[in-house]
Each structure stands twice: as structure tokens, then as C-alpha cells.
Amino acid sequence: MGRPSTLAKRATTTSATSTSTSKVADAACTNGPYTRTCWSSGFSAATDFDAKWPVTGKTVSYSFELVNSTCDPDGSGSSRPCQLFNGQLPGPTVRANWGDTISVTLTNKLTTNGTGIHWHGIRQLNTGDQDGVPGITECPLAPGQSKTYTWLATQFGTTWFHSHFSAQYGDGATGQIIIDGPASSNYDIDLGAMPLTDWYYQDSWVVGLQAHASLQAFAAPPPADTILINGTNMSPNNQTGAYSKTTGLVAGKKYRLRLINISVDNPLRVSLDGHPFTVITSDLVPIKPWTTNWILIAIGQRYDVIFTATAANAKVGNFWLRVHYAAQCLSSGNNNPNALGIFSYANAPSGNPASTAYTEPADCIEPLSNLVPWVSNTVNSTAFLNQVGNLEVDISVPGLDGNGQNIVIWGVNLSAIDVNWDKPTTQYVKDGNTSYPTNLNLIELPTEGIWSYWIIQEPSNSPVPIPHPIHLHGHDFYVLGTGSGIFDKNTSPSTLKYTNPPRRDTAFLPGGGWLALAFPTDNPGAWLMHCHIAWHVSDGLAVQFLEGKSSSKFPLGDSSWDANCKSWNTFDATMPFPKTDSGLKLVKDSVN
Ligand code: C2O
């Protein structure tokens, strides 16, 4: 298979000295309120950041300790065990500039659990050993041990990090990432990241076991108890707790807000009364700005939005931010499904807002037609269209098939993944061992520089026919299309979009339908793709692809990687709470 020309620059271009193919920033153009598309000499929002990025030579360093704690964020008295980075809820923010190197040293201060940090949405170009996925790219970090993650910010925008060790992130082990860079629309003031999450009054271990039992019985997992905005909310009876407050808005100014859904189970819909949102990103991809009153955010997704403070609104002063559980997406529900936060103008009267909500949509539709990347890239459709005719007739049959072709079909009720914490996929590559146990759900993508296409199909007899937020590590994927029912090889291909399709790292697989994705093989590594509903990945709803195993750039980890595995294996031999799930979000594995 020849190397597609649209891909050549992506596969062969990895340094700052490479030439861009499109609009290049004026050297004199610097980033400011009226020139947000600018960044620095030669780099702008128009730069194809998969092909080119600045290299500042600067390293931004952080130290995190993961500590046992207890949490009662709404003061309801439902205090529960939690596990927090530096004891903070929400977790700390990592902030750097586009092109900086980020270096984070994590110390595991827990006594009986492993951990690690996954940098959600970060490409990790040739640094997959820093992707932080236990059993895939590393051994978990044993209690008392430290590890330093180092990676280059080739992208810019808003994302988050979280533990990928079983369902630990549901216990608060998350944080925000802001990489400052250009933007596709102007704004005056950056309000920073606003993490939004469902919240349970019991810890993830307990709820995870209940969720597992319900999934076995084809029943819904337990509903969440409430929603936290920036780690806070009033209690359901409104007696305790606090609203998240953003104050000091000034008429005439434009504000950038970075929304992140870090939930375990709930898709969330967000609106700010009286202030339409101009949406400028889909995950870490700048898009053509578009305006909406409500935005639906799947678990793992981010949207950066801009709103304008107006003189008329300044007279009113206080406005509700509404964060609702999106019931149409049919996840397990939420006992306190409508959370509120407050946005106030400078000199606003005291007291709660009396603002009116915009009409809330009643759907579970990702706004794909509005997600138009600022930098237009085209997916090579040739291999896809040549091969799609040869697909099995009934692709709803569970199973994965690479067939040596570019198209992989993933029926989401295939065998559950079950990784081995003691022996990550990377170790197999180091050892030249190709005897992968079946339940690693491993698909080899041996050839670099080609397009890989995925059709993810929720079978008609799916036990959980609900929308699933599908997330890929190591790449942004191109969303070629979605549909209801079974993908039809005769009619569905003509509905797909190959010219500048939406690009992001997390997308909805429609309930009972299909999702077609593409990505170029340009990053050797072991990459997980999974449903980001923590209970689903915990129950094994994941595959991993082993990309470019023979490439000299395949990240094998250094001596500290080996030392970390050694300490983990020593701990694991006597671990008080053995693994009871897929390992990616809770079963002591039988595979060694
Ligand atoms: Cu948010 Cu597998 O990651």
C-alpha cells in the first residue's frame, strides 16, 4: 500500500523546522485580545499541529502526591473516602505554553492501591511510555514510589488528566490541563478550566461493584447522587454546600471558559442564562466558531466557549450557569440532576440570580455538523472505499477483524479486555513476545504512514444500547460519520465525510448505532480505545492497538520504567486488594 499523499507530511514531519503547507502566521503577529489566532513567529491557529509545533526548550514542572482523603463537597454529610492529587478537589491544573515540555513527578502516598496518570487527549508523539495506562504502557505505581512523566505539548487548548488505575478517577484523582496557544476567535479574559462531574456519595470501588453486578443482570448501574461544578455544589436540600461562583464580569468584555466533563457515568448539558456560547474547540482541536445556548458534553470531551458580557446583563447582575444530566443519553441517571453555578457582574446585587433558562434541547446528539476544524485536513478515502465492499455482511456479530486490511470492525460486545498490571503491552514489545493473550483485545497496526479506519458497531442485541463516549489514546480521530442501526456497506459509505470531518479524541457512538472513525498511523505505541463510562471500561469495553511495533521510534521505556515495574511486581505479590476488574478503571487476572 502506497503512502497517501495527504498523509506524507504527517508521517514524516516531526520537527519544528519543517515547513507548513498552509497559511503561516505573520512573524509580527502576536497573540492578544484582538489577535487570538496569532501565536508566535511561524505558528498560529492555522498551523496543522499534527505536522508542526514550536519547541520552546522550556520545561514546566509539577510535583503531585496522590493521597487518601475524605470528601464531602456539598456538605451533605455524605463523607466518603476519596483519592486526591495534592489533596485537592478538583485536582490541580497543569498549565504551560504550546511547545513546552511538561514534567510531572507523581508520588503514590496511598497505602494499598497502585496509581498512575493518564494525560487525556495528549498525543504523546513517540512518548507512548508516558501515556500512563497500567497494563498497557506501564506498570502501576506502587505505594511509596515516585515516577516522573515527561511529554511535549505539541497541541494547545484544554484537557484533563486522570488516574487510569481501575475506577480511581471517580474518587477524585483528576486534574485540568491548559496549554496556552492561539485560538480561532478573539476574547479578552480567560476564565480558565471548569471541570464538571457526576458525584457519588459512596466511593468508586463500592459503586463500581454495584455497577458490575447490574451490568451482569442487564440492569442500569446505580444513579449518581449529584453534580459538582468546579468541585462544589449546594446539597440536594439546599441547606449546605456552596455554588461555584465566577464574579467580576464587565460589560463589553469577552470571556473564554473551558468546559470539561470528567464524569464517571453522566453526559452533561451546559448553559449560561442570557449568554449564548460561541464554541471554539472540539477537545484539543480549534474549530470554526459557532453559537449555541446549550452544549452537550460527553464524558471526556471538552468545549472551550466564549461569551460576551453586555450592558443590559450588567444591569441585572447575576446569572445561573446550568449543568444538567442529559437524560436523553440514557446513562444511569442522577438523583440531583440539575446543578447550578453563579456568574456575576462587578457590583452585582447580593443574592441568587433570578435569570431564566434557555429552552433545553431534548436529545443526545453530538453537534458534528458544527465541529468544523479550523485547519482543514482530508482523510484519504481510497483504501476505505476499496475495502468496505468486502466487509462481512453482518457486522453486528461481535468480534474484531483487522484481516490485514485498513478497516477494523469493533462490535462493542466482544470479549472484555483484561489487562495484566504486572506485564504491560510495552513489556511484550521489549521482550519480542507476540503471544498476546486474547483478552488483551490487541489489534496490531504494523504499518506506519497509512490510514486506519474503524467502524464501531453497537449490535442490535446489545445489553446496553445506549450512547457510549468512545475515546482514543495517542491520536485525534476523524469522525467520518455516525448512524442508527447496523452499518450498511452498500449505503452507509456514501453518507461519510472525508473532507475536513470533525476531529477530536472522544465522540459519541449513538445508542444502537455505529460510529465510523479514521486516523493516520503516525505514532508508534500501544494505544487504548475505550468507552469512557468508567463502569464500562472497568467491565472491559476497550480495545488496544499496537501500532508500529517494529519502528525505531516505538517507546520502550527507559531504566526507570523497568525499575517501576520491578517495584510494582514486588508489591503486587502481596497486594491487599487484588485487581477485580479489567484493570483499566477494577479480577485478579488469570493471565501471566
Ligand atoms: Cu480519559 Cu483512556 O482516558
Image (cartoon, grey):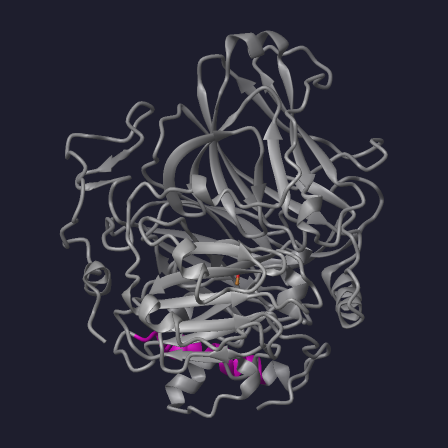
Direction from residue 401 to residue 260 in the image, left or right = right
469 within the magenta span: no
Q: Point out the residue furthest to the front here.
A: 490
Q: Is residue 132 visible?
A: no
In the displayed structure, 479 sits above or below 344; it is below
In the displayed structure, 301 sits above or below 468; it is above
Percent of width and height locating residue 577:
72, 76
Of 264 and 560, nearer the camera is 264
Query: Range of the magenta residues?
Result: 554-569
Which residue is located at x 38 percent, y 46 percent? 285
Percent of width and height locating residue 319:
64, 20
556 within the magenta span: yes
Percent of width and height locating residue 77:
85, 44
Q: Quadrant of residue 286?
A: top left
Most common SS among magenta residues? helix
Percent of width and height locating residue 504:
43, 52
Of 95 and 20, nearer the camera is 20
Which residue is located at x 32 percent, y 37 percent? 182
Q: Is residue 85 visible?
A: yes
Q: Quadrant of residue 232?
A: top right
